[in-house]
Each structure stands twice: as C-alpha cells, then as structure tokens.
Image (cartoon, rainbow, N blue to C red):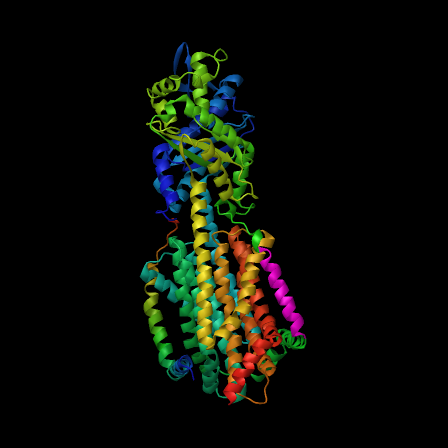
Amino acid sequence: LDVNSDAYRQYLKFAEIFGNEQFLFIAIRNEAQLDRPEVLKWLHSLTSKLEEIEKVTSVASLSNTRVLRENNGKFGFSLLVSNTNGAPHLPEGTELERIRAALPIMDFLVSRDLKTVGIFIRLDEQHKYDIPIIEGLLGQMRAVVKANIPETSEFRIIGPPSIILAIHRYNIQTAMIFWALCLTIGISVTVYIFKSMKVAALALLVIGLSVLWILAFMSVTGIPLTATTALSFGLVLIVSVAVVIRIVTHFNERYQVVRDRVEAARQGLGVVFFPCFVCSVTTAVGFGTTMVTSIPMVFQLGLVMFLGVLLSFVMAVILTPAFLIAMKPLEARSYQRMAGDWVALALAGMEKAIFGHYLIVTVLGVTLTLAMVAGVPFIRSDTQLLRMLSASTKEMKDLRFVESHLAALHTLELVIEADGGAFNKPQAWEKVSDLEKELRKLPEVISTDSFLPFLEYLDRLFHGSGERQGGVLSNPGLIRDLFALLSLSEEGRLMTGRYVDGCRSLLHVSVRIRNSPGVPIAETIETVRSTAASVMKEEGKVTVTGDIAVFASQASEIVRSQLLSLALAFTIITIILMIHLGSALLGLISLITNIPPVAVIFGVMGWLGISLDTITVFAASVALGLAVDDTVHYLSVLKEQIRLKDPQKSVEDCVRKAYSVTAKAMVSTSAVLFFGFLVLIISPFKPVVSFGILGASAILAAVLADVIFLPSVILTSSGIRRFLGSRMSLRGS
Amino acid sequence: LNAHEFLAEKAVGILIDYRKLLVGLVAVLTIILALFIPQLSTDPTMK
C-alpha cells in the first residue's frame, strides 16, 4: 500500500472527519424470529461481550441502537429495543419500518423477515493491515459468538480486514505450494531428460544453494518475507533448473565427441556460457523492470527476482561443470535412451515438417499471432480486492450469505465539499435529494445512505406527517434548527458526525453498489463520481473514496507502472540481444519470436476475458524475460554455425544444425517453465490462476515460436537468407 | 573474437581451472550466509 498516494490521503481525511469505515461484520441467522424476547436477550449479551474485546472501538447492533423518538410527550434518544417487565421487545411493525427508512444502517442490523441480525464491530484504524492482530481479533470474536448464540443458529464474520487476511493467507499458501511443485517438476523433467539421478541431485543442489543465498540476502538487507517475495523462490527455482539443463545438455554432447570430462565441460560451457549469461540478464531485466512501482511489496519482488536470477546463474556455472567433471560419466545406454525418447522422436518429426513446409508454418504462425493481437481490444482492467478471491472461497461464500440475508456490503463513500454552512440550507439538501435519485437510477447502484432520510424522520416526528408541503426542505430555518437540536446530545452529535462535518460544509453519502462481475470497479467509481459532479456542480467538489476506491486506485497505479515496465523490458532486452548477437538485424530477428508470447498474453486476456490487474500485468514482462532465453540460445548457435565458414554449408544447413543442437534443451527448459506456471492454477487466488494460465501460454507460444516459427521465418524470408548468406561469405573470404 | 566472447572464454577458463577453489568458496560463503537466515523478518501487514 502506497501511503503517500492521493487516494490514500483522501481516505485518511475522510476517516478523520466522518470516522473510519474499518469494520468487521457478524451476521447471525436464527430459527426463531427476532421479536422473541430470548433472541433479543442473547443479542444483548453478545453485544456486551463483544464490546469488552480489546482493540474494538465500537459495536453496533439492534440491542444498543438508540433512536430519537417521543416518549410520554418528551423527545429524546432511547434504545430501539424496549424493555417491558424484563422482557425485551422490538417496536411494532410500522414504527420499525419508519425507523428503518430513517436509519439506513438498519438494513444491516436486522433482515426483513426478522430472522437474521447483524453486528458491526469497528476496529482501530491503526490495526487495519495488521494481520496478526486481525487474526487474533477474529479468533476472539468467533469464540464469543459461539458461546452466546443458540446452537441452531449459524453465523458469518466478514469485512475488509478478514478479506485482507484471507488474501494474505492464500498468497503464502500459493507461494509454498508453487515452490514445492516447481521443485518436483524441475527434478522430474531433469530425470526424464538426462535419465540420471545424479544430474537431478546436481540441479537440486544448485536450486537449494540459490534459495539459501537469496534468503540470506533478504536477511542482510532487511527485505521481509511477504506474500510477494515468497513467490520469488518458485520462479528462481525454475530459472536455475533451466541453466543447469542447458549446461548438462552441451556437456553431454561434447563428451560423446571428446571423451574427456574436463575438455567436455570446457567446450560445453564455452558454447553455453555467454548465451546463458545473456538469458539470465534478460530474465533478470524482465523481473527487474517490475521495480518501476511505488508499491514496496512489488519493488521488493522485482529486486529479489533480479538478484535471484543472476545469483542462480552464478551458482549454476560454478557448480554444474565442477560436479559434472567430478561425477562418474553417464553410461552409454543413458545416451542411447536420451536419443530414443519420445521428445527426441517428436523433435525429429517436427524437423521434417519445418524444413519441408516452412512457408505454411510461417503463414500459420503469423495468422495465429494476428488472431491473438485481435483480442487486445477486448482486454478490460478490473482492479479490486474482491475480484481476487474465487467464488468457492469461504470469504466469498460468507459475503454472499450476508448479501442474501441482509444487504450489500460494497459501498463507495461520496464526499461533497461545499462552502461553509452550505448544508444548513434547504437548497443544498434539495440537490442532495436529486443526487440520491440520480444515483439510484444507475444500474450498479443499489441504494444510497445519507442524512436526508433522518432529517425527514425528525421533521415528521416533531411536526407530524402530511400537513405541510415540501417536508423538511420547505422551511428555510428548519434544517439549522434540527442540527442545533441534535448537537445537544452525544448520540445526536455522533449520528450527525457520520454524515455532515461541524462546519456543515462537507457531506458524506454512502453509495451501496452491486459490484457485478461484468462491470469493472473503475467504471462504477467514475460513473458515480461524474453523476454526482453533474448534479452537485453548483454546490461544490465531489470525491469518491472508501476501501474499494483506495484499492482500485492503487491497483490502477500498479497496472500503469507495469505497462511501463513491459515497454522498458522489451527495449532493454532487444538492445541486449543486438549487442550479444553483434548485429542490429539479428537483434531485430529475435523480435520475431518475442512478439508471439507477448501477443498470446494479451490475446488470451482479451479472448478469455482475463482481467488486466495487479498480478496479471506482471505476466507480460516476466514471460518476455523468460521467453527470450530460447531465442538467445538458438540464434547463438546459428551465429556460431555461420561463423564456422564451411563452404559446403548453405543457410538452410546452418538453420537445421542450430535446430538439432538446441531444440531438445529448449523443449526441456520450456517444459519446466510451462508446468511451473501451470501449477499456479491450483491457487484460490484468481489473479494468480490467471497469471499461471498467461505465463504457461506465453512459454508455450515462445517455445513454438523458437523451435518452429523462427527457423521457418528465416527460411521463408529471402531478405534474412541473403543477410545470413552475406555474413557466411564475408566470414569465408 | 568479439570482446564479450573473449571475456566469456576467459570466464570459462577460470570456472574450469579453478573449479575446486570456487566450489570451496561457495561452500564457505554458504555456511557464513546461513548464519544470517534466522534474522529473516516476515511482514504480514501488507503495508
């Protein structure tokens, strides 16, 4: 959370004036209706027990709600629940309905069928993001509720703090499961490819030491283990396995020729060292550019990943050759099994298809890329906290329980800033009345809560109903008098203070919204704000705040900064490739294979309706950093083949040789990355699931682009062929 | 050879010729760094 953002400052100002909106809400569903005295008795006892809990600022339930009403000719605040001969009871039907209309909070305190009651528990603002404190409070509340309600009743506790807690918990769970599954996948792929437990143990050693060093780096620099930094271990793991796989592949290839482990390691590492270094740099840049953010957690993830990727490269190049030299060489039958496994056979079949029909493959690749690009206009951005949890999570079920039995909990807080004393005048309240009518016409708005119904209730209470035209707004001095009257009692001041400030220049209107899945929250916020601004333009400035608005604004900021990071990653990676390949044109050729993964990410988002949010926006720059690795290896080997200046070889022979040398390593490392991303679909956290789908799609697109599309494009394009041919003759002369 | 290829060749030479020294260095540093791990802080506050 960026506490320096305008949205957060606005929210703090709002909380300071009108009180914080930080609450936990308990909904209790009973068999018996609330008009039964025993139900009201346990509600009273439960409310008192909840008030005793430390760090709870206030508790609001039916049992302690006080309303202004007439009692034996006198007006004053009294408890809504009356007590006759020791038996508590609710007001009779019509009076209860009148109070319900005057006090919108009543919708949350009791359902229309009188079988569900709600209790608001306000917490101290300073504990808002304090997970251990919220966890402790929730535990205490559950125990108190269980002990005070009948066994047949069911209850739910929900509210922004419990949602934040759930997201935090799911995030950590996801990070741990991701790490464990990535480890399993990395090791399994290594064992399958190299048919050797020793190589798998070597990969495990590199992974283990890389993670240990990252943890130590975090300890030394004071970077805490958070929901985002915990996710980095799984990502570092799959990246370090990829480097080990490439080194071992080239070692094995060279060992079969030179039959000397030291020389095989020297030659193998010689081929792969610089491409692997460039790959690590590009991957680190992909992750590192996510540091372009004002959100500390995201910055820390970018930094840990940036250093983690480079560190795992250093570990892999030190340990892998050293252990390959020290280990007993693989047996001949292992090489035979490697050459005859289904991956090798599939790649051989693919080779025939590519080099026989490269024009068709190119057309197919371009068509698919364009089809993906066509999905871009359908991308929508929906940046809000609640969209992060899938419908099957306990928190979302609890929320639906409250919404179905009581009222919608999603609110936007509208603040109207006018001249001093403006809200003492009926003209301003007429505008407020118009505003509420206009807002209720909006499809996403369920209802509005303002102080106007209570003023009308007071007017009817003091003057009776029906005799006067225009009600509370007809008498110029009446509203000022009602405010003066309310200011005489503590309850009156509290009630007024939730909606109007002391100078009568600031007004708060709470807007309950549907938060329909098909409507992005930013759109709802903007519609509410612009509607309010157009109605209240003569009265003053309108702002929309509240938890939902703050999170939406912060998340939009992350999305904006990460789109910048993608552009940055794309530019830096292309420059690195141009330098590495020693040619601007070869660098640009590498873009051919970088476009499909990025197109797939945005195309899948558009076509599958995956929202661009705080987590999915990372997918593009991260996948770009990872996807470019295979391109680097392929083009490095191709460049090497061209440099061999063999007059017997054509451009097609060089392209084919580069394919046969690199294809298996590309497929193997991509398999680790693909499955690594795919395991994220187990997460209960929707953006993480989307991140997994997008990452896996991008890796699939990248490997297809590198293994199939790139050779086909080179062979199809006469310009590229001429360029490569000229490089060969230049080298040869 | 390009400058970066020359550097890469040198780096490979060092990695192969001094592999035992480098592995030893990694081992020693790992032991030292492992001592810092218990100081790792967690921040579940989402601040």
Q: Where is residue A427, by image quadrant?
A: top left
| A162 with respect to A519 (left or right) | left
Residue A359 shown in magenta: yes
At 35% from the left and 64% from the top, the residue drawn is A216
| Whether residue B36 is situated above or below residue A163 in the rendered picture | below
Task: Decide if residue A542 is in sight here.
Answer: yes
Instruction: From the top left corner, tell me how far across and down residue A261 is, in percent.
Output: 47, 85
Instruction: From the top left corner, tell me how far across and down residue A348 is, in percent.
Output: 64, 77
Viewer-proximal residue among A238 and A333: A238
At 32% from the left and 19% from the top, the residue drawn is A488
Q: Taken as a whole, is the magenta stretch helix, strand or loop? A: helix
Instruction: From the top left corner, tell me how far across and down residue A124 is, in percent.
Output: 35, 38
Task: Decide if residue A85 is in sight here.
Answer: no
Total numbered labels placed on residues in the image: 0
Viewer-proximal residue among A371 and A158: A371
| Whether residue A478 is situated above or below residue A107 in the rendered picture | above
Instruction: From the top left corner, tell me how far across and down residue A169 is, in percent.
Output: 46, 50
At 32% from the left and 62% from the top, the residue drawn is A220
Viewer-proximal residue among A128 and A588: A588
Q: Where is residue A431, by image quadrant?
A: top left
Stretch of the chain drawn in magenta: A357-375
Q: Where is residue B37, by image quadrant?
A: bottom left
